[in-house]
């Protein structure tokens, strides 16, 4: 602290100038040429932290690179606390809030993402990433269940910089007592607190698609006016603003999104977020969904039966659906998401951006498909995907 | 004071311009060719994985590595790790400073997030790390136990008032080189070594070295040189 105060005093301004001049001299971007540099690059991009150059781990990774055992080199980086506590935290943090901000405290969605990526101690295998949208699990911190109505335990762990490990962050099932409709992080306290609070639960669909299918509602709307709008509920005005202009607006804009979203939103008909806690009322549609009546002839939600209508035209190729397009509740909704091709390619896009620090370009579609196929073959191992992406030829060029 | 401030601004401006040139000249992806290869990279389990690569495609010619700044939480974790700090109180103090600055640091690790505010925040965080590093090193006897400031006497006798006797140039060069290895992973260039000496000389410019300030000056020089390296764009980049 003393140093910082000192910097602010007039008498040291010259020294600050001096210091900045030194900083300026180091403004070139180093390229990875030696094996140690490649090891540092590989480690920092996978684990999110740069190591000391005297680090024994860096030497081990460097030796693996020298032996051309690139996968083992990557594995060394993946088996570190840094990977889980820095890199994966950064990966899951923006998925966990409506603002998609990076600077958030630890919450149960991030914790579930990290814990689900730990190697399963009983099977010694990775857990599938698909569990994040359909798994019936949550996490324990130091063996204790998290409170449903607050984030205090995880906030404290974050503020105290507790290192999360398979020992202190464990998974447990079921997600909640007497709760048959768990859908991974979609029914986590954090996701519900962001997207099921107030509103009409449409945001649950909107953000499930954004975070796990990398697709915003603007992209998957179906503006075909000959297409039925039978799922659009009563709270959507059929002529916003009135007159023909309003009718046209509904026909060309409103229904294009609502027909898609409202049919799926029913999956969360029994879910709510009240008094700081997620609530599930089996058999009872939460009141907020049917409350507002702008158009009495609209659809009335009476159950959690959902239907996916985003199955036509461009959406066929966009999502690559397989499995049931109808179901009941959040769990089957999560199943549907996890079985789409887009679920895998979305993970590839996110991990590629995270590790390679750039987005895949349209000219790299076949690389994306190869990585997605490998991800599926590897039973949706997120650790495996990090490794595959890091070692892909368009990313870090470690093997050159 | 005014002259010094103007000089600061000009230097910052030059630095940021240089940063912009370097970091925006990044990747220009081109098509790759090939298909699914036979690389054996394991099955996604924790078991041993072998093979020279994973996805068997041929890298496109001319594709360059995409450089990027470290996201905020990576930067502070990297500095602490690289400096080898172990004093928990010192680390807590670093995080106190970091928490006040982190909103200015790159959030997503994108090159567009490098700006004057980010560099200034990096400078403040690095300063705190370097203060802790200096404290850690000063507590050790001069010699092999120290990672960085070998040959630097942090507690000169009251009679030491000569600038070369206070911190000799060889010690500065060695310290600068050690800091460059620590935070940048390479040896300092000859030009950079010269700069460390110049930095020391400038830090002492106009100062009357006496028994009252000689310890403070040595400590300030150590932190100043360290902060220059640890807050550089090269240190910030991953």
Image: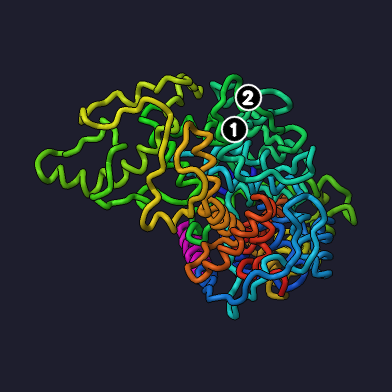
Residue assigned mark 1:
A108
Residue B144 screen position, x and y as percent: 90, 56
Residue A35 screen position, x and y as percent: 77, 69
Residue assigned mark 2:
A146
Mark sitting earlier along the chain (1/2): 1
Quadrant for the N terminus of chain A, please. Answer: top right
The region drawn magenta spans B1-20
Residue B218 shows in the view: no
**Residue contact between numbered discs 1 and 2, judged by CB atoms under 8 Å:** yes
Name the element at disc 2: loop
Residue lying at 65% horizontally and 59% vertically, measured from the top left = A374
Task: Confirm whether the magenta stretch covers residue B13.
Answer: yes
Q: Farthest residue in the left direction?
A: A243
Task: Confirm whether the magenta stretch covers residue A221.
Answer: no
Q: Tell me if A185 is positioned left or right of B48 in this view.
A: left
Query: Along the line of sight, which residue is nearer the eye, A84 or A105?
Result: A84
Query: Along the line of sight, which residue is nearer the eye, A262 or A94?
Result: A262
Up/down of B70 relative to B87, above or below: below
Residue lying at 49% horizontally and 43% vertically, measured from the top left = A324
Query: Along the line of sight, which residue is nearer the eye, B119 or A31?
Result: A31
Q: Compute the Cα span from label 1 to label 2.
A: 8 Å
């Amino acid at each position: 602290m003393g140093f910082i105060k000192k910097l602010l005093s007039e008498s040291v301004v010259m020294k600050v100038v001096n210091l900045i001049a030194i900083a300026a001299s180091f403004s070139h971007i180093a390229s990875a040429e030696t094996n140690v540099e490649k090891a540092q690059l590989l480690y920092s991009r996978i684990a999110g932290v740069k190591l000391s150059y005297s680090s024994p781990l860096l030497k081990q990774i460097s030796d693996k690179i020298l032996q051309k055992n690139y996968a083992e080199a990557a594995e060394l980086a993946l088996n570190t606390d840094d990977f889980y506590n820095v890199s994966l935290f950064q990966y899951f943090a923006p998925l966990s809030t409506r603002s998609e901000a990076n600077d958030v405290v630890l919450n149960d969605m991030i914790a579930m993402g990290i814990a689900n990526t730990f190697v399963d101690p009983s099977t010694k295998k990775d857990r599938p990433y698909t569990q994040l949208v359909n798994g019936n699990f949550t996490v324990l911190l130091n063996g204790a269940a998290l409170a449903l109505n607050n984030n205090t335990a995880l906030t404290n762990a974050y503020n105290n910089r507790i290192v999360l490990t398979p020992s202190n962050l464990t998974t447990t099932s079921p997600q909640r007592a007497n709760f048959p409709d768990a859908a991974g992080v979609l029914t986590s306290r954090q996701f519900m607190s962001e997207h099921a609070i107030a509103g009409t639960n449409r945001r649950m669909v909107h953000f499930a698609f954004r975070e796990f299918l990398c697709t915003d509602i603007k992209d998957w709307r179906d503006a075909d006016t000959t297409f039925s709008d039978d799922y659009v509920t009563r709270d959507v005005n059929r002529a916003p603003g009135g007159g023909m202009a309003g009718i046209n607006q509904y026909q060309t804009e409103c229904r294009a999104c609502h027909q898609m979203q409202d049919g799926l939103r029913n999956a969360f008909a029994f879910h709510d977020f009240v008094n700081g806690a997620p609530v599930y009322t089996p058999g009872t549609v939460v009141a907020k969904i049917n409350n507002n009546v702008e158009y009495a002839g609209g659809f009335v939600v009476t159950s959690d039966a959902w239907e996916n209508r985003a199955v036509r035209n461009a959406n066929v190729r966009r999502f690559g659906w397989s499995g049931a397009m109808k179901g009941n509740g959040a769990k089957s909704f999560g199943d549907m998401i996890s079985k789409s091709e887009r679920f895998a390619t979305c993970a590839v896009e996110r991990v590629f951006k995270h590790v390679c620090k750039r987005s895949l370009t349209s000219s790299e579609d076949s690389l994306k498909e190869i990585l997605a196929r490998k991800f599926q073959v590897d039973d949706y191992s997120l650790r495996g995907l990090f490794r595959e992406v890091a070692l892909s030829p368009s990313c870090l060029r470690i093997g050159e | 004071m005014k002259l010094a401030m103007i000089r600061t601004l000009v230097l910052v401006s030059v630095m940021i311009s240089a940063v912009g040139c370097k970091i925006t000249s990044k990747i220009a992806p081109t098509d790759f060719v090939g298909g699914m290869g036979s690389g054996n990279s394991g099955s996604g389990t924790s078991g041993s994985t072998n093979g020279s690569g994973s996805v068997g495609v041929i890298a496109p010619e001319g594709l360059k590595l995409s450089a990027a700044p470290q996201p905020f939480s990576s930067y502070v974790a990297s500095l602490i790790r690289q400096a080898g700090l172990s004093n928990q109180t010192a680390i807590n103090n670093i995080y106190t400073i970091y928490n006040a600055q982190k909103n200015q640091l790159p959030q997503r690790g994108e090159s567009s997030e490098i700006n004057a505010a980010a560099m200034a925040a990096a400078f403040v965080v690095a300063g705190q790390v370097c203060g802790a590093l200096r404290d850690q090193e000063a507590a050790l006897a001069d010699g092999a136990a120290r990672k960085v400031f070998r040959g630097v006497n942090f507690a000169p006798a009251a009679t030491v008032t000569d600038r070369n006797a206070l911190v000799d140039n060889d010690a500065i060069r060695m310290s600068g080189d050690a800091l460059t290895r620590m935070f940048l992973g390479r040896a300092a260039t000859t030009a950079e070594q010269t700069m460390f000496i110049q930095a020391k000389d400038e830090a002492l410019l106009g100062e009357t070295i006496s028994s009252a300030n000689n310890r403070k000056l040595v400590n300030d020089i150590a932190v100043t040189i360290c902060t220059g390296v640890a807050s550089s764009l090269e240190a910030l980049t991953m």
